[in-house]
Image (tube, helix red, strand yellow):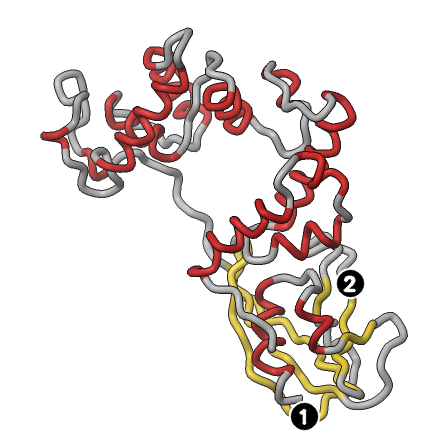
Amino acid sequence: MLQQTTVSTVMPRFHAWMGRFPTISDLAEAEEQEVLAAWEGLGYYSRARRLHAAARTVMERHGGDIPVEESDLLSLPGIGAYTAAAIRAFAYDQHAVVLDTNIIRVLARWGNMSDPIDTALGKNNLAAIAASFFPRTECRAMASALMDLGATICKSGDPDCTSCPLQKTCRVSEPKKLPKKSSRSVTTKLVEHRAWFWKANRLYLEQSQGPRWRGLWILPELGNAQSSGRILPEITYPITRYRVKMKVHRVVGKIPALLKGFTVDELVALPMPSPFRKVIVNLASGS
């Protein structure tokens, strides 16, 4: 029987990922399909691909040692300003301005920032405030302290200002309203129709060519395939700014040559997006 992916399994899956690829060389030497299969349930698969590519780059260019210099870190696939700063601060205790969600909340409130933090002006103001907090040395301790402050006292919503060590210098007037963000984009609803080809105890899937779910195995689009008229249980899932309703149709007739059949046991280890996994979990045993 296939296993479903739920929120409660995220951390066990992360620990399983770390156990499967405990070193940079282990990750670099793995095949992409193995990496993607292990990543299921941990978020966007593009992150797994970038981690994989970064591991290979570290092995090829840096002898397996994660670099210290910011320019070298930023040259690695998937490494942006925040990740580079976090590596420099926490791994090497180098000068770096670390700005995660908790730290941004603390600094935005302390400076009583009225500009949305996701705008150019807001980012510039936040950078100026952060520069006054992070010292030239011992950035590891400062980043940890600000993270803890944001997680325990300067929490989202209603903070415990009376317990805050920064209360004497904090200029915030309405902490519940900070930090500000730009208005969210409207969620668009979509409906997609997928085909369920089941024959001789095998489910036939296609390997996505992208841009969405590139390299993962998915149910093919219904297209011009002849539906039996029976719509199987559907599922709704979010992806970026869309909310997608997936309707699965049992299909009769010839199976397209580009599809590949898998037994239930083979499906367990196959890399596929979580929404498709959930549909297959619900339907495979009864086919």
Question: Looking at the picture, how far across and down is residue 119, in whole percent?
Answer: 44, 30
Residue placed furthest toward the left: 162
**Residue drawn where x is 57% and y is 45% of the image:** 18
Q: Amino acid at mark 2?
A: Gln
Sequence-first tag of 1 and 2: 2
Residue position marked by numbered label 2 in the rendering: 207
- Mark 2: give few (<14), some (14-19) or many (20+) Cα within 10 Å: some
**Which of the pair 225/9 is nearer the observer?**
9
Q: Secondary structure at mark 1?
A: strand
Q: Is residue 118 above or below residue 195?
A: above
Question: Looking at the picture, how far across and down is residue 16, in whole percent?
Answer: 56, 52
Q: Is residue 138 above or below residue 285?
A: above
Q: Is residue 233 above or below residue 44?
A: below
**Residue drawn where x is 41% and y is 7% of the image:** 136
Left or right? Give the position of 6 relative to 36.
left
Residue 270's label in the rendered image is: none
Question: Looking at the picture, how far across and down is residue 14, in whole percent?
Answer: 52, 49
Q: Secondary structure at mark 2?
A: strand
Q: CA distance from mark 1 to mark 2?
A: 25 Å
Q: Quadrant of residue 221?
A: bottom right
The N terminus, quarter of image: bottom right
Left or right? Give the position of 285 relative to 166.
right
Q: Amino acid at mark 1?
A: Gly
Q: Is residue 77 above or below residue 32?
A: above
Residue position marked by numbered label 1 in the rendering: 229
- Mark 1: give few (<14), some (14-19) or many (20+) Cα within 10 Å: few
